[in-house]
Amino acid sequence: MVKLHDSYKKLLQIYTFSSNIIGTPLLPSRFVPSHQNRHDIRFKTSGAGERALQERQRQHMARGLPKQKPIAGVKEVIVVASGKGGVGKSTTAVNLALGLMANDQSKSVGLLDADVYGPSIPKLMNLKGNPELTDNNLMRPLVNFGISCMSMGFLVEEVAPIVWRGLMVMSAIEKLIRQVDWGNLDYLVIDMPPGTGDVQLSITQNIPIAGAVIVSTPQDIALLDARRGAEMFRKVNVPVLGLVQNMSVFQCPKCNHQTHIFGSDGAKELAHTLGVEMLGDIPLHLNIRETSDKGQPVVVSSPNSPEAEAYRRVAAAVVRQLAKRPS
């Protein structure tokens, strides 16, 4: 009987802890004391009580988090993210970086590939080889088209799978951020992995982020995950600069008929719902795919094309949003 009584007391302690921290009990209702029913729980998390609960949550999450430390020499960090893979995030990140420099030649731009499991930057930027080391044992970024680049793809064989657990991935991300001689950069664009997992949290908790750019197609299933991505950045206090609607429309090269293969204006509607900027539309165009596969991004290989202009408009919109931030 004593053991049973002690077990019951422990379960009640777990129940009280979970209710205080997250507002949702971890125990089924039969373990709730008879004097505390569901209506009582809802009452405690409503109105002023809910605000107090949210503040406790914020304080609890802040405990033990690492202090943000800027990257040496880097003025502003822009993360390019998506909730789902396959929406053209990496292609957008590459052309955004090139667009930032094309719009203002005085700006220096870097590109960090944080997608450890599926690095795309080496292929998109036509870069191969291992980074050299400085006298301080820092890796020198590989450079093409005037952009300094770092990726896990430079450190492993091109087709080698990276089969790592979370802690190893976190360690790799830390090295790609801190053990690289970035020099002096006006902008560092980080190509984030898809989703809202460990890498996203690690980066946002460790370095100050100027803002996040969310990439999505107009398709409903992609927009669901894009919204999760935007909400994740808001929870970790990273400004969402806006949305990019990728693959927005396909224009037939023969008859010029336009077809919205993935739907129309879905990202615009999501941006309105979230109260963020619509940064621009990128068409579904053969030229973007071909130049990306060749490692000759469209912004540099076809600078006068409508597709390159679309990316430059996105880059200009990002700079405008950065300028709107409170100083």
Image (spheres, rainbow, N blue to C red):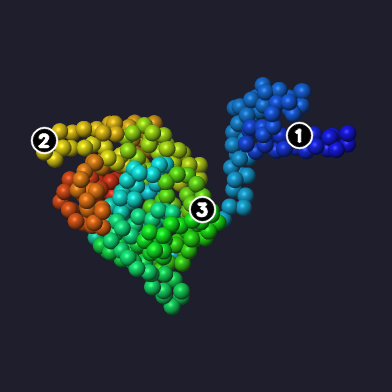
Residue shown at 77% from the left, 23% from the top: 34
Q: Which numbered dot is residue 153?
A: none
For the residues labelled 2 and 1, the Cα–Cα distance comes to 70 Å
For the residues labelled 3 and 2, the Cα–Cα distance comes to 48 Å
Kindly indicate the quadrant of the structure image that contains residue 293: bottom left
Residue 74 appearing in the image: no
Where is 20 relative to 145, above or below?
A: above
Residue shown at 70% from the left, 26% from the top: 29
Q: Identify residue type, mark 3.
A: Ser
Q: Position of residue 209 (x, y in %)?
A: 44, 52
Q: Identify residue type, mark 2.
A: Cys
Q: 10 Å neighbourhood of mark 1: few (<14), some, or many (≥20)? A: some
Compare marks 2 and 1 and give the one earlier in the sequence: 1
Q: Which numbered dot is residue 255?
A: 2
Where is 219 relative to 143, above or below?
A: above
Which residue lies under the disc numbered 3? Answer: 202
Comparing 9 with 164, the one in front is: 164
Q: Label 3, secondary structure: give it.
A: helix
Comparing 219 with 21, the one in front is: 219
Whether tag 2 and tag 1 are in contact, CB under 8 A, the answer is no
281 sits to left or right of 181: left
Q: Which numbered dot is residue 12?
A: 1
Comparing 190 with 108, the one in front is: 190
Q: Label 1, secondary structure: give it.
A: helix
Where is 191 relative to 267, above or below?
A: below
